[in-house]
Amino acid sequence: MAEKLSRAERRELERQQEQEEKILSKKREVVYKEMVQAQRLSLREEKVAPADSFISLQHINKIYPNRVQAVFDFNLEIKEREFIVFVGPSGCGKSTTLRMIAGLEEITGGDLYINGEFANELEPKDRDTAMVFQSYALYPHMTVYDNMAFGLQMRHVPKAEIEERVKKVAEILQITEYLDRKPKALSGGQCQRVALGRAIVRNAKVFLMDEPLSNLDAKLRVQMRSEIVKLHNELGATTIYVTHDQIEAMTMASRIVVMNKGYIQQIGTPKVIYNHPANTFVATFIGSPAMNIIEGKYFKDHIELSDICSIKLSKEMIEAHDKFYQEEIEAAHKRIEEVKEVLIKYEQDKKRKKADEEFVVDEALIEEELNADPEVNELRKNIEHYQECLSSKDGHAIYFGIRPEDIIEKGSASLIKNPSMSMKLKVSIAELLGNEYYAHIDFAGKDTIAKVNAELNVEKGQELELVFNLDKYSLFDTFNGKNIKPFKE
Ligand code: ADP
């Protein structure tokens, strides 16, 4: 239970929080102003689209007027015909990014190119994009035909051509028989098909889809999922699809962009994201049940997971470990310097407004602010931890990540090349899913899941003899969660 604080302690805590908030809002203000100014200057430069990508997002940032930064330094090159999925929990900035591409939201910083053209300042209607939303937003008083034809009529497409296009798309989507109906006489799935149809008839070069299936029930979602993929294969339009559902991301994407808290966590094919997650966030967000993360101890040439399992480390892993921590130390120092510059800049701006005097950095004040800055404090703690990880003789904490299907019952492990020593572990819960069990195991006090073939007949309380597939594990730092051996193409 949390200790009860005295009044003086409470006041001190409040004072600290106030000061932290003050510094954070200073930083936000400086970052916003600098970004807006840099962007203004940048827009005067001549912009040349990168030759080898169809949609290019370069250092895209979004800060809303209330100074909430929703997207941080988003970089992505999309090739023609790709099916890109933005995935992440609610509020991570997926829709904001998509809406900036569509032109529905202003870009605070960075450059956007679509189809060879600098697009930051293009009107939405000039971007050759068609958007499909979660709410189908069909016109209730119009028939399905008119709903699909409306956009083309507004663009003054000849009537005969409209008819031809609508009928063709209706056939692809199998909604021909509903063309005369009004939306209220359609099911949710049919409405979403019409919304898709309305986007397709426009022959847009880019489809932007914002959670288009989340209003549908589970079964229909699965069906529509494969229909959209089939449609993409047929039409070949470059597609960016936003979802919070990792299964949609894995099954539909040619490449996935995993986001969290406004930052890209990882970009890669579904296979790379699944097999080489960049950090514990990606590792546990993608895949169901989630990857098991077990705390272990890293020694110079092996790791120990409690007293249950010892794993010898490869030469590559040991090299990756040392390189990782050296780079993290450098990056943390660099970031602290950046924060310092931001704080100095704030003081400088303030002084300039007061008088035209020479600016002298008040080192003591800046140091005091750095000491009170929560980000800097965390970075400093991290540096200490990284240094210890590099030099520690008695081992340091590490997260060992292993997917449930890579914890294998010994009898079925003959096919894997690199099994760990075998471990006898007790099952606490056995969930039968038809063809397999999710066997929950108590691994040194941590609930760990293994997928076990249903033919084995697993029961609660039973002891299983298990091995890890050592070709498939990942190691993550315990402070920042990053994979210490990042994937290289
Ligand atoms: P997602 O699509 O991943 O759920 P969003 O892009 O909608 O996330 O939102 C990202 C962040 O931006 C959230 O913190 C959200 O509250 C904030 N946000 C979204 N729209 C606005 C707005 N118009 N004004 C201020 N903040 C906003």
Image (cartoon, grey):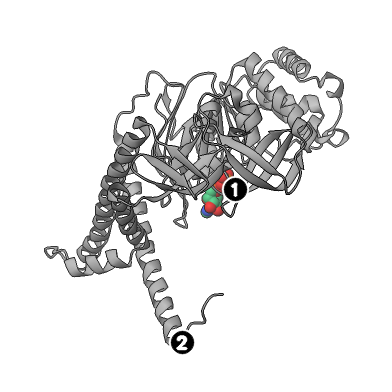
Q: Position of residue 167 (x, y in %)?
A: 77, 15
Earlier sequence position, callout 2 versus callout 1 = 2
Q: Position of residue 243 (x, y in %)?
A: 62, 38
Q: What is the three-letter code of the residue carrying label 2? A: Arg
Residue labelled 1 has its Cβ within 8 Å of some atom of ligand 1: yes
Residue under circle 1?
Answer: 90
| In front of the other: 484 or 185 | 484
Identify which residue is drawn at 34% across, 47% down: 35
Residue behind label 2 places its C-beta within 8 angstroms of ligand 1? no
What secondary structure is found at the residue carrying circle 2?
Answer: helix
* Left or right, 414 with reference to 349: right
Q: Quadrant of residue 317?
A: top left
Pick the front one: 357 or 26: 26
Q: From the viewer's perspective, is the residue at label 2 or at label 1 nearer?
A: 2
Q: Is residue 288 visible?
A: no
Q: Is residue 331 above or below residue 247?
A: below
**Callout 2 crowding tier (Cα within 10 Å): few <14, some 14–19, many ≥20:** few
User: Above or below — where is 72 with respect to 240?
Assistant: below
Relative image position of residue 354 (x, y in whole percent): 21, 68
Q: Is residue 367 at all visible to an observer of this figure?
A: yes
